[in-house]
Amino acid sequence: MKLSCPMPKLEFDIITLGHGSGGTLTNQLLTSGVFSVLSNEYLDEKHDGAILSMHGKMAFSSDSFVIAPIFFPGGNIGELAVNGTVNDLAMCGAIPQYLSLSFIIEEGLAVADFWEILIGIKSACAQAGVMVVTGDTKVVEKGKGDKIFINTAGVGMLHQNANISFRNIKPGDKIILSNQIATHGISIMSVREGLTFETDIVSDSVNLNHTVKKLLDAFGEKIHLLKDPTRGGVATVLNEIARDANVGIDINDQHIPVNEQVLGACELLGLDPLYVANEGVFMAFVDASIADEVVKMLQQDENGTFAACVGEVTSVHPKQVILNSRIGGKRVINMLVGEQLPRIC
Amino acid sequence: MKLSCPMPKLEFDIITLGHGSGGTLTNQLLTSGVFSVLSNEYLDEKHDGAILSMHGKMAFSSDSFVIAPIFFPGGNIGELAVNGTVNDLAMCGAIPQYLSLSFIIEEGLAVADFWEILIGIKSACAQAGVMVVTGDTKVVEKGKGDKIFINTAGVGMLHQNANISFRNIKPGDKIILSNQIATHGISIMSVREGLTFETDIVSDSVNLNHTVKKLLDAFGEKIHLLKDPTRGGVATVLNEIARDANVGIDINDQHIPVNEQVLGACELLGLDPLYVANEGVFMAFVDASIADEVVKMLQQDENGTFAACVGEVTSVHPKQVILNSRIGGKRVINMLVGEQLPRIC
């Protein structure tokens, strides 16, 4: 879903330091821009924070987004910032409800770009079913930022059936990937300065909360852990889980879903797709008894077409992640060392 | 209260792009730095978000901090980031409880500086009685940020007696300033590149939540509105309130508490203290019947030594803020136009 809203007539074409002053210009920008686009009963209170009613166990998460470029195939930094925090909440087993939205803008950003990002935020919020209820706008001098950085924090009540923790993982658990990996990272690389190559790969940035809710509705506590492999990719996240839960992890190369074009781009760039960032994929560690059903349910979901069971938890080699290759070889998969793709989210 | 913790031995002296990769270096930085300094049961779960129990009305707020310089007389960006969000929650009438903490670091930041900021965060959290429960670390290239930006979001349950809203303001309400104004802005100006001047003015950055709680314990719903005049200063915030509540505001120049040295610096720099940013001051709009008692209670609090009743709400000139001078003159006080002191918080 893409919304389209005409941009209001403003007296300025670019964001200046004055828009971060807290004074008249900040008020103009907020009133004619942010508040008009994102209006809701909480935000319209315009207080230092929003007052929400919460009863029970709640998840609370925050992420800053510094992606470059801010517009990329399949989305922009605004959508990404909403989906990123929505998905972090979903990975906790929560129903995302309310977001905060904080901008750090480099002076000189075109108001038209800011507007497009705001519309991206509005669209992503509508799709995920969340509201921006509070926020902040800062402006820094030219050369002290990079167009725009966005922080979102979010809260949401836990799903009543959810019990998500690395402590629940046990040997025999199956590991399911919800969709094809490495798409987001490769889509960003394809438009990075100096690296442009022909592709129609678009970012998989999407909200996963409705998909996760379906799984929790159906399988509850048998879903042991959910994790979205963003920065550092599948390999890094699996290593963190193996370390924290003190278990071994076996994965099968041939079962890992990757788009052919993405795989081709990875080969071209010398990247291992297991280390490339994802935005619309999650891993579920589930009780073996429900693994097939989970995969089937995911495959019927628009965000899980290529879902597959890719491995399982073992007690044999604690804290290690082992990749079994197509031809029977085994190799240890370590956490990402150094920086593969800076500013991918 | 200032904590002192020995810095752990790390294999690196400066933060590099790899520390934002999500991989091994990020894990090293978090494990030996952030998690060890800020450890608590929620943060130690290391999930994508924290799970909290909340029952009732809750406040939710977020601010990004881009102050330059990051170390200044009386504090650093870490303490400021904690106090800023703690105070925003307090201004909502809430008891601040849990914070998120998100860093955007420019590569090249000295680990020793990062450590000092972390210790500032830990000290400020201890003083306010809050915990960092979730967070995020991003690193951007040299020249695409400015040392470090910090976002904090926070949540806390509303005080049971609180009913804070601009809708509660009515003509006759008294306006109380909790302490001397313009101290933060002037302390930052005194160390800005090119502006250095001799002074021992230090920032008033402090947590106001305990002070606010005392007022709410004693006076409950008779406290109609609380606001901390940060960016844009007292003048801008009064104008926002007059506009949103559709009331007039009269303030008396001679009652506004300002330190002599701050006033001297303002004159030197050609600044009006009413527009200079504060970090440890709030304004209370209260029922006239309790105004004297509120001032007395504040004056006995360490954060309210110079508290004073500075004006009142009127129906006579809606949406206008009028300053009555010592010699009987009146002038309209408008919102800050343009940018007076960029990156003051």
Image (tube, coloured by chain):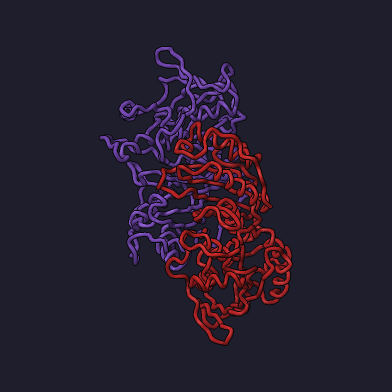
Chain colours: A purple, B red
Is any atom of residue A162 visible in this view? Answer: no
> For the view shown, which residue lies furthest in the bottom direction?
B328
Looking at the image, residue B123 lies above or below residue A294:
below
Front residue of A204 and A190? A190
Question: Percent from the top left, x then y, of residue B44?
Answer: 62, 37
The residue under the point 43% across, 59% down is A34
Q: In which quarter of the image is residue A118?
A: bottom left
Front residue of B189 and A176? B189
Question: Percent from the top left, x then y, of residue A316?
Answer: 57, 16
Looking at the image, residue A126 lies above or below residue A191:
below
Q: In this view, does A280 lie to the left or right of B215?
A: left
The residue under the point 69% across, 59% down is B210
Question: Percent from the top left, x then y, of residue A313?
Answer: 55, 22
> For the view shown, which residue lies furthest in the top direction?
A328
Q: How many marks?
A: 0
Question: Percent from the top left, x then y, of residue A201?
Answer: 31, 35
Looking at the image, residue A169 lies above or below residue B60:
above
Is any atom of residue B256 visible in this view? Answer: yes
Looking at the image, residue A88 lies above or below residue A14:
above
Q: In this view, does A206 lie to the left or right of A265?
A: right
The residue under the point 60% across, 24% down is A246
Q: In which quarter of the image is residue B95?
A: bottom right
> For the view shown, which residue lies furthest in the left direction?
A198
- Which quarter of the figure is the C terminus of chain A placed in? top left
